[in-house]
Amino acid sequence: MIYLDHAASTYPYVEVIHLFRDSLGEAFANPSAAHRLGLQEELKIKDAKNRLAKVLHCEAGELILCSGATEAANMAIKGYLNANRHSGKKVLVTAAEHAAVYQTAKFICAKLQLEFCEIALNRDGTVDLADLAQQLNQECAFVCVMAVNNETGAVNDLHAVTRLLHEKAPQAKLCVDYVQALCKAELNLRQAAVDFGIFSGHKVHAPKGVGMLYVKKGTRIEPLLHGGGHQGGLRSGTENALFAEALAIAVEHGTRNLRADREKVAKLRRIFMEHLDESLYCVNSATDASPWILNLSFEGVKGETLLHALADQETYISQASSCHSKAPHSHVLKAMKLSVSRMESAVRVSFDASQSEADIEKASGQINELVRALRRISKR
Ligand code: PLP
């Protein structure tokens, strides 16, 4: 099997598997329980949050553990806008945002009668800063700009975004989806001057079902989940020490190896491209995009057809983002103004540093053969 769909989900690190294998049977006590076993679990959660805060350069109290990035996005966007009803009338969201952010913002804007404004993209998939500058004003309550796009790997200039916000809408809160940037770029939340940060475990070799929201100290949000008042009353529900530890292990591991992994992945991407027949494809990702994600079009062959043909050979890629693979065209590629034939034939290949060069070469070869064969069939 050759798995090239790491932007959709990753396998858990061996250390994470060992953690579950060794501790699942023992780590059963409730972290809120007053007895010693409960206290042990509570200490594990505190330790995990401290370790995560150290890596991300923030305070442990600014991190809320949750089920994943979708929940984190809901907590941030609904939580802030529900708690701060008079903070402004407009919410700005880039056209590239993942559905977890985009749809949440759209929903709450309709509900609270706020203006939902989409920020345009450049042709390379990054946010159009001129459009952002034009739309930012004193009426803006909330702005969502993702760090790295999950379909194309486009990297946004968050320094430029925060500068614009500071100049034109200092009252607006900035929410950054860091899902595809975590362990792939150096993150310093204190310096980044963001108000909310969204993270997911299963994209960084932790299990599915764990994620995290960073909420800058002093930012008021209304909780989504009410109950026993866990995590400072912001996310009620019994905490899962194993998930917290797994996330800390994965994020520490990924951050420690970031530079080496980046070099390795860039090399894999190069090898992949070198072995593809250049007469067959065009590249939809910018040259300076995250090396982990590569979006390509093989015009004349539907992305879905290629995906399934490759899967028959046990090589796995995806069409766009796997979360909304049922939509006719990717909203991101559409916002980049790609032609219909290019959108229809687009696929996403996403790498991981653990992969072998031989597998990557093999995958390119399979794609060359399949695209040629599928084009022959469609011409008949
Ligand atoms: N944001 C981005 C950029 C993503 O790629 C994803 C997952 O595909 C999400 C948010 C949602 O993450 P989760 O699966 O943890 O809810």
Image (spheres, rainbow, N blue to C red):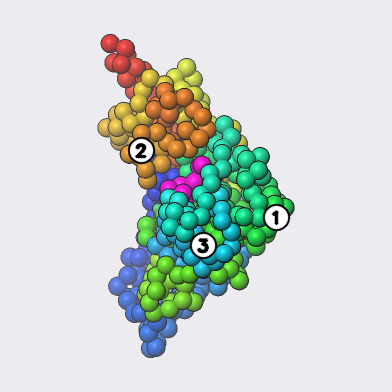
Q: Quadrant of the N terminus?
A: top left
Instruction: Tell whether circle 1 marks a residue whose Cβ is less than 8 angstroms from ligand 1.
Output: no
> x, y percentage for residue 133?
66, 45
Q: Is mark 3 on a helix, strand or loop?
A: helix
What is the span of residues highlighted in magenta in the rendered image?
94-102
Tell whether label 3 touches label 1 (CB within 8 Å).
no
| Residue in the picture at 40% in, 33% down | 329
Decide: few, some or many residues near mark 2? Use Cα within 10 Å; few <14, some 14-19, many ≥20.
few
| Residue in the picture at 33% in, 65% down | 21
- Decide whether residue 119 is among the magenta residues: no
- Label for residue 81? 3
Residues under labels 1 and 3: Cα distance? 20 Å
Q: Which residue lies furthest to the top in this view?
A: 380
Mark 2 vs 1, N-terminal side: 1
In the rendered image of this protein, does residue 331 appear above or below residue 188? above
Mark 1 vs 3, N-terminal side: 3
| Residue in the picture at 53% in, 65% down | 85
Residues under labels 2 and 1: Cα distance? 36 Å
> Which dot, 2 or 3, sits closer to the camera?
3
Q: Report which residue position mark 1 lands on.
A: 166
Q: In which quarter of the image is the C terminus?
A: top left
Mark 3 residue type: Leu
Instruction: Tell whether circle 2 marks a residue whose Cβ is less than 8 angstroms from ligand 1.
Output: no
Decide: few, some or many residues near mark 3? Use Cα within 10 Å; few <14, some 14-19, many ≥20.
many
Residues under labels 2 and 3: Cα distance? 28 Å
Q: Is mark 2 on a helix, strand or loop?
A: loop
Q: Report which residue position mark 2 lands on.
A: 327
